[in-house]
Image (tube, grey):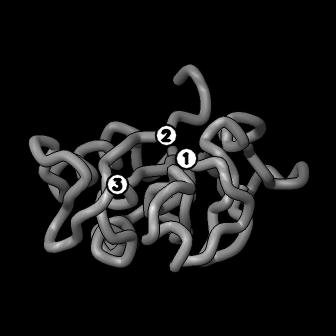
Amino acid sequence: MIVSSVSLAVAAMAFVAGTAVSGNGGNPSARARAVATFAGGCFWCIQPPFDALPGVLRTTVGYTGGTAVDPSYEQVCAGGTGHAEAIEVEYDPAVVSYETLLAVFWHNIDPTTKDRQFCDIGHQYRSAIFVHDDA
């Protein structure tokens, strides 16, 4: 549930509803879909490893986890919105598992650094996993 390709201006809780969807409109030959959301520093740095993964249908970058609605890049960088740069991964769970997505995430971040990944420093570059359902 992405607001736009550059702005995930909804709080993480907004992603809870309807994320592990089949979305096939009753067509059994259509792919099943699920969604995962990760924050791991600059969204453009963490996006390529997911894009290269078989079973990933689409990735979208933006902001999530904050309070401001539709924040700009400048607002997020200035602080105060609470957002993190994040990537939403739409994937086919029959091809790639959530556990594999987690492995890609963990191999592309440094969990021992606070509010920093790669050369980017600031609260918006924190690492986080935003869950969509109990699974």
Precedes in sequence: disc 2 or disc 3: 3
In the image, is 120 to the left or to the right of 134? left
Percent of width and height locating residue 76: 50, 67
Q: Do tag 2 and tag 1 residues touch (Cβ < 8 Å)?
A: yes
Closer to viewer: mark 2 or mark 3: 3
Q: Which residue carries the number 2 mark? A: 130
- Vertical position of residue 81 compared to residue 74: above or below: above
In the image, is 109 to the left or to the right of 12? left
Q: In which quarter of the image is the N terminus?
A: bottom right
Q: Which residue carries the number 3 mark? A: 123
Percent of width and height locating residue 36: 51, 47
Q: Mark 2 packing: few (<14 Cα in 10 Å), some, or many (20+)? A: some
Closer to viewer: mark 2 or mark 1: 1
Q: Quadrant of residue 43?
A: bottom left
37, 34: nearer the viewer: 37
Secondary structure found at label 3: helix
Precedes in sequence: disc 2 or disc 1: 1
Q: Which residue carries the number 1 mark? A: 65
Amino acid on which the number 1 mark rests in the picture: Gly
Precedes in sequence: disc 3 or disc 1: 1
Amino acid on which the number 2 mark rests in the picture: Phe
Residue under the image location 56 percent in, 20 percent down: 134
8, 71: nearer the viewer: 71
